[in-house]
Image (tube, rainbow, N blue to C red):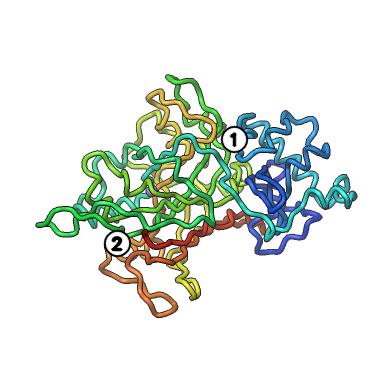
Amino acid sequence: MIKANDPALKSWIEVSKDSDFPIQNIPFGVFKTNNISERVGTRIGDKVVDLNALFVLGYLDNLPFQREDFDTDSLNEIMKHGKAATSDLRNRISKLFNSENTDLAGNAHHVEQVLFDVQNVEMCMPVKVGDYTDFYSSRDHATNVGTMFRDPDNALLPNWLHIPVGYHGRASSIIPTGKSIKRPKGQQKPNEDEGPVFGPCKLLDFELEMAFVTFDGKELGDSISTKEAKDYIFGMCIMNDWSARDIQKWEYVPLGPFLAKSFASSVSPWIVTMDALEPFSIDGPDQDPKVLPYLEYEGKHHYDIDLEVSIKPENSEETTVCNSNYKYMYWNMVQQLAHHTVNGCNVRCGDMMASGTISGPERSSFGSMLEISWKGTKPFKMKDGSERKFLQDNDTVIMRGHCEKDGVRIGFGEVSTKILPAD
Ligand code: MN
């Protein structure tokens, strides 16, 4: 067991029972305050820990990091040191905040410089994303979409059970929680017999996804095997991969999604490391037909992560519209990364790869309004009496996720995004 994952560990920082951030988590993120610029931090309970300050005060000595790795606006600099170094960093932080350790806890002057109340910080985009890839790896989601738009009897396209299908998305428009989006505009073709029209998207949707970020991969021309893939993945966050369904429907043949997806994708602010998630790994589904040898894998690479989506209309309470789980993935991360690089494509530090919409088998676990409202044919009843087929202006969409086992809860916090009207 990784020492920092020991369920028996306690921190000298108070952590409430339902917190996503016990000492067993130690995620990484980027924050700023009114007085200090962006820097790398972690979170325990309701305290954000300034890793730049920890470094300056000498608590991160004898690790392979420099001050510039923490005094910066992304996690890319610490990620450049690779898996072993970031694991050591997490273990060091775990030791420092252990209730039995007084090195830092005993120095009130230092504690004051290092800890911030979470309500006094602003969370920023955690990673400088170079390339963003979106997979399509939930079988229930692919089946639902295939059933709605093609043929219920042949819902999955012939390649789906053989290839972790994906497409190259847009990195520049990935934004952190709290940043509003504007309803996108674009071409739609609402009527079969008439030409296309231009205007604000009418079928705006969320996609419940999780994303992983990579360390530097191999040289162009080399591949990462399923066996090696784990060493190239830093951690995960929740992603809301916004989608404009009407724009998508008109544009996506023959080359796939373009402007329907590229206007925004929102992420939760803390990257939870694969180390922290290890206790929650589980077996994946049987894959039949048998996959090609380069996609075979050993070990547990699926994860039991509860996910939920709620919609909060303006001046009203939020309603949960979806309870799903990352375990519903058919293809896992090591297969996705092996597939991504099997042709020699190089991945770089800070690349982000999303799962695709994560739907389970029931309506209550569908990860998009497209599926929940079944293309708009089954409106969803909200707590305030209003109905949703798709998203309305001034709705806030909130996604949350956490794992729980042996009394330890490891969570991601939330990604919360308000939709503003189109110009
Ligand atoms: Mn997507």
Percent x, y of residue 337? 45, 34
- Of all residues shown, which one is farthest toward the front? 423
Q: Nearer the viewer, mark 1 or mark 2?
A: 2
Asked if residue 49 is positioned above or below residue 92 in the image, the reply reads below
User: Is any atom of residue 164 visible in this view?
Assistant: yes
Quadrant of the drawing holding the N terminus? top right
Residue depicted at x 39% and y 42%: 135
Percent x, y of residue 98? 80, 49
- Disc 1 to disc 2, how far (Cα)? 37 Å
Asked if residue 372 is positioned above or below residue 170 in the image, the reply reads below
Is residue 293 or residue 374 the one in the foreground? 374
Residue depicted at x 36% and y 40%: 166
Amino acid type of the residue tagged 2 in the rendering? Lys
**Residue wearing tag 2:** 202
Percent x, y of residue 102? 88, 48
User: Is any atom of residue 361 visible in this view?
Assistant: no
**Residue wearing tag 1:** 76
Considering only order in the chain, which callout, 2 or 1, is on the residue closer to the N terminus?
1
